[in-house]
Image (spheres, rainbow, N blue to C red):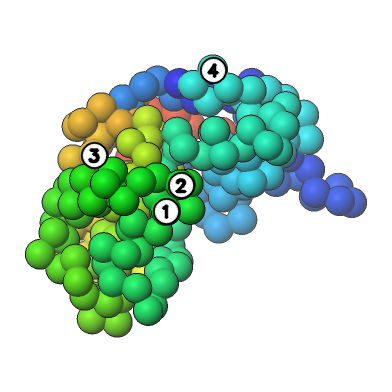
Amino acid sequence: MIYFKNVSKIYPPDIVAVKDVHLQIEPGEFVSIVGQSGTGKTTLIKMMIAEERPTNGEIQINGLDVAGMHPKNVPILRRQLGVIFQDFKLLEKKTVFENVAFALQVCGVSSGQINKIVPQVLEIVGLDKKRNRYPDQLSGGEQQRVVIARSLVHAPKIIVADEPTGNLDTLNTNEVIEILKRINDLGVTVVLVTHNREIVNMLRRRVITIDSGMIVNDQAKGKYIL
């Protein structure tokens, strides 16, 4: 479960990015967080993954106290979260397989486990037959699918996707969203941050609208209304 209680984030000297947010996302939900640029969406996500700390308020992720978490415990949180950003950040000199495997290698996972896990996640995103290709041999949509595969290697309970289709055309956008829906069908909570009105309206899932750092609308099966 994701739980925010009276969360605010104020940057010096007095820039209010997020104000008095109260939010609860249940396990297995697919939630879109929407709003115009500069409304606080990304700040909210950064606090969720402990990249930023709230100025005040309480944040819990699957029972972990994120707001008060000691830095040494952040990796424990991150293993429960799969994070996908707009920027692919792939290693150009590594193959698809190696890019995904690298996320496990840095955590000390054995080669035997890596050879078991990586093919499984590549199959989920439809790249099992392109495992030996390099990033520059892939389309933008395929590169984003590598990022999604990388986010799945620790079997996270939550996927956080911040504008994952921002650099993609309509076809590749739809493919990425279908993969996120498939992951959600496996029981993984998906939090999608997007400004793409068509995606949100097509999903017909829960929509949380943020404006001026505050939640102004929360619909169980909503649309992008701004």
Q: CA distance from mark 3 to mark 1?
A: 23 Å
**Residue at 30% across, 76% down:** 135
Q: Quadrant of residue 212?
A: top right
According to the image, label 3 marks what residue? 183
Element class at badge 2: loop
**Residue at 21% across, 45% down:** 116
Element class at badge 1: helix
- Near mark 3 (Cα within 10 A), the count class, few <14, some 14-19 or many ≥20, is many
Amino acid type, callout 1 = Gln
Of circles 1 and 4, the one toward us is 1
Q: Where residue 220 appears, x then y in whole percent?
A: 34, 25
**Residue at 35% across, 64% down:** 99
Whichever of labels 2 and 3 marks the residue nearer the N terminus, that label is: 2
- Which mark is drawn over residue 63? 4
Whichever of labels 3 and 1 marks the residue nearer the N terminus, that label is: 1
Amino acid type, callout 2 = Gly
Query: Left or right: where does residue 159 sit relative to residue 117?
Result: right
Question: As rendered, which of 120 and 159 lies closer to the eye?
Answer: 120
Of circles 3 and 1, the one toward us is 1
Of circles 2 and 3, the one toward us is 2
According to the image, label 2 marks what residue? 108
Q: Where residue 138 appears, x then y in whole percent?
A: 23, 76
Q: CA distance from mark 4 to mark 2?
A: 25 Å
- Near mark 1 (Cα within 10 A), the count class, few <14, some 14-19 or many ≥20, is few
Q: Is residue 216 visible?
A: no
- Which mark is drawn over residue 105? 1
Most extreme residue toward the bottom is 136
